[in-house]
Image (cartoon, rainbow, N blue to C red):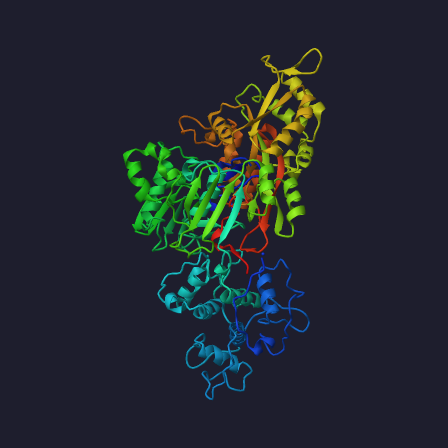
Amino acid sequence: MNAITACEEGGACQPPFHLKPSAATISATTLLRKENYMRRFLSIVLAVVMLLAVCSPVLTARAAGFKDVAASYWAFDEITALAAKKVLAGYTDGTFKPGGKVTREEFAKMIVVAKGLALVKPAKASFTDVAASRWSYGYVEAAVKAGYIKGIGGGKYAPAAQIKRQDMAVLLVRVIGKEAESKTIKESVAFANDEPKIGTYAIGAVTIAVRPRVQLLTWDKSRNLNPTMSATRGDCAFAIYNTITPPATGKKTITMVDENAPENLFPLISDSAYTMKAVTFLASAPISVTPYGVPFPEMAKYVPTLANKHLIRNADGTVISDVELRKGMKWSDGQLVTIDDYIFSHQLYMSDAIQVVTRSPMDLVTKIQKINNYTCRIYWKSWNTYIPVGWTIYPKHILGPQFVKDPKSINTSAFNNKPVYCGPYTVKTNVQGQYMTLAANKNWFGGQPVFDTITEKFILATNTLLINMLTGQPDVSSESLTLDLAQQFESKMGKSFNVYYNKSTSAGIMEWNLTSAWFKDKRVRQAFYYGIDRKTITLKALVGTEAVLSPLSSGSVYFKPVLAKYAYNPTKANALLDAAGWKWNAAKTARALPDGTPATLKIPYSTGATFREREVTLMQPMLAKLGITVEQDPKDFDGILDAATAGTFIVNLHGVSFDNYDVFGSVLAFRSDQIPTEKNGMNGQNNYRYSSADMDKWLNTAEKATTAVALKEAYSHIQDIFAEDLPCLYLEQRIYPDEVRKGLKGYDHFFSCTIYNNWNVQYWYWFK
């Protein structure tokens, strides 16, 4: 997929909701508007046996604190809490060995102890391989009596065998009383790339085990559940804790604050990242992506690959892929989701009557063949890993009749602010510009979310947002406070909140209109690069530590620091302006453009973006050395965006995000066919009006390249051309702080330009 994301005022710089959930996957510049409480245990009557070692006779109980379980370990809270309650124990050397494997008899003991069951030692053993003389006999029999254990067949239990993750799920689903329900589930809904590996007998249990209000299993970084792998002690601790203290035990509300409200709730026609972020709460996607850039199936049953034979690459570079939706999914109004919705969405994206922000990847489709109500086959001109992530799905039964009657009516449809999606939350209240309250979608196909209600407040000015945060009422603020304000917040509220400083893929950007008298000459653009001390501005504006050195993310394998050559040098800058015909006045205090226009430049930025104000203030004396007078021009960000699209601007200042994974998306906006025109419905992303045959050539090469060598060559040329032509000016590489109340589980602190912090919000819960 292809995208840069532009952002402002602290910046939730990330693209559309379908990325919700890693690699940039939209071919569009998505513009942003302005840039753990300790968990109480359920009352459990614990038997004296809880004082004994849990995992084998050689273990000893410790109150808490294992030298090999750092606070950053993913199951630290669960291990610590269970150890404190004597449900789990460590080894005599002070370790817990969280990666150690667990046998089936050890797991039986864990459950019995956790549930406070009395040992049972019947005269006749339930299993031929668990004799009365075996150390685990009383535990296994207690679990049998409770109905938790049924053996592996043939009168055996296999006590010394390591327990598989899917078997752990089967057993614990019995413990929580959902075995009967699990047996009614015939197709998995586990949001994992390895769902086909789930044993038939475990499909229902695994499906239940990953539901938000259950959470007995977790995914690895490749978005696999590894159902046939042996469970670790860390796995078991996490699962057992959530068995006895389910995620929904705690408070079921949360309050979030953001720096700006969504433009609307319809990403098809909105280039606001705040729209994308808001819709992340509301909409699932056929294929989603993790913060690590890994696509995974959400509404779809699989991600098409060569390995699973749902993807065919032809010799001419064209590709055929299959899409199969999960059965039984419903839109939030109760209507079934079918493949017709998927196909209809392509019609929406390709309609010239609709003000579509980007048609990628839909414009790569040559044919769609419906197979049945849940499956279709798509023929593509070209393909990359993230193409399936970019396909957003909309309800045909809602928008279809409108589209047939008058396609243009979609632009002003009631759907824009009162949408129907198939996601974990629905809109309960939407006071535009102020706040939204969201209600859990109890019929979401992935299971009811943990929080019943989410309140999201929108506070425009960062200083006001800080004051609001200091009251202690909001629970989460992500990418909204600037670096200095986040540091202030941490100094005052650090006992109650975690503050994460995420080095971002986002940058400050000064967009230039290259058709204007100001910036049509590349020598002038080069002069601005030499005449603005970008690193000093970054440091003094308190938004980061480094200046941007390439139009590609510094985390990309193709990154070249091509902008490093533009070290601050006012002398070079003035020489370039002289060569471009910019004239000094007699006193050499001010310049005029070649046409005689005074060199007075108003720089628009989003109202309330205090750090942008600082940046412009810092630029003023720097550009004054070049004879350029700079004036502050704070404006409504919608107006800035509209002017950029229409080409009625000279310059603007906001933010943009790159992507480590979808490199092409970071540079697509420099292709000439992305210039917004009446012919393309003003849908292009090249607001700079930049046109270069060489840049087009190498961008097209990069888009079609299939080898690492070819890609490296193409992106090398693209960066070199950018550094010569300079279609825009990049400022700081941003630091994005997240402020999160301690005790919130499931929250991922990271920065990606492809997903939002709320990508997995349905799984968040308060640790009790």
Relative to residue 96, is residue 399 depicted above or below? Answer: above
Outermost residue to the front: 471
Give how far across and how far down residue 669 sits, in percent. 50, 33
In front: 559, or 469? Answer: 469
For the point 41% across and 54% down, which residue is it? 302
Residue 297 seen: yes
Relative to residue 63, is residue 315 depicted above or below? Answer: above
Give how far across and how far down residue 583 sits, in percent. 65, 14
In front: 734, or 382? Answer: 734
Give how far across and how far down residue 372 sits, in percent. 29, 52
In front: 173, or 286? Answer: 173
Residue 557 seen: no
Relative to residue 631, is residue 339 depicted above or below? Answer: below
Give how far across and how far down residue 355 sits, in percent. 40, 32
For the point 45% across and 74% down, which residue is it? 148
Horizontal placement of 435 versus 584: left or right? left
Residue 368 lies in what quarter of the image? top left
Horizontal placement of 714 versus 192: left or right? right
